Amino acid sequence: MANDDKEEKSKAVTIVIDGTPYEVDKGDLTYVELVTLADPEYPQHPETTYSVTYKRGHGNKPEGTLSPGGSVKVKDGMVFNVSRTGQS
């Protein structure tokens, strides 16, 4: 049973969005998922656009910008900034 607990914990990572920590499943997060974490009202207002940048990412791309429709592989301690830019 101890092994099951260890496996469960290894599937989650802590990321930081605009200074707030979130525990998410390890793997890819989409633009929509990140924006929704930062602004829970986003699904009701998809016409609003956001700038999503990140740092402390994986070695091959430690920093970058995530565009609508995109996704990024998350790792523990990754930092995201999500800013409203207006309407498209």
Image (spheres, grey):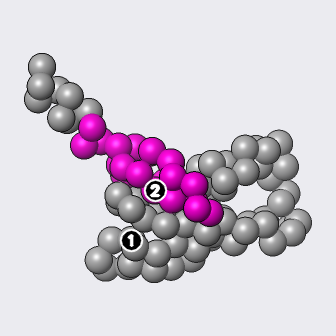
Q: Secondary structure at mark 1?
A: loop
Q: Is residue 25 magenta?
A: yes
Q: Secondary structure at mark 2?
A: strand
Per the image, the residue denoted by label 1 is 57
Give the residue type at disc 1: Gly
- Residue bounds of the magenta highlight: 9-30
Residue 47 x, y percent position in the rendering: 85, 57
Q: Tag on residue 25?
A: none
Q: Residue furthest top?
A: 1
Q: Tell me the residue at 72%/44% (across/down).
A: 40
Q: Are marks 2 and 1 in contact (CB under 8 Å)?
A: no
Per the image, the residue denoted by label 2 is 15
Give the residue type at disc 2: Ile
Q: Tell me the residue at 62%/63% (across/down).
A: 18
Q: Quadrant of the C terminus?
A: bottom right
Count of numbered tags: 2
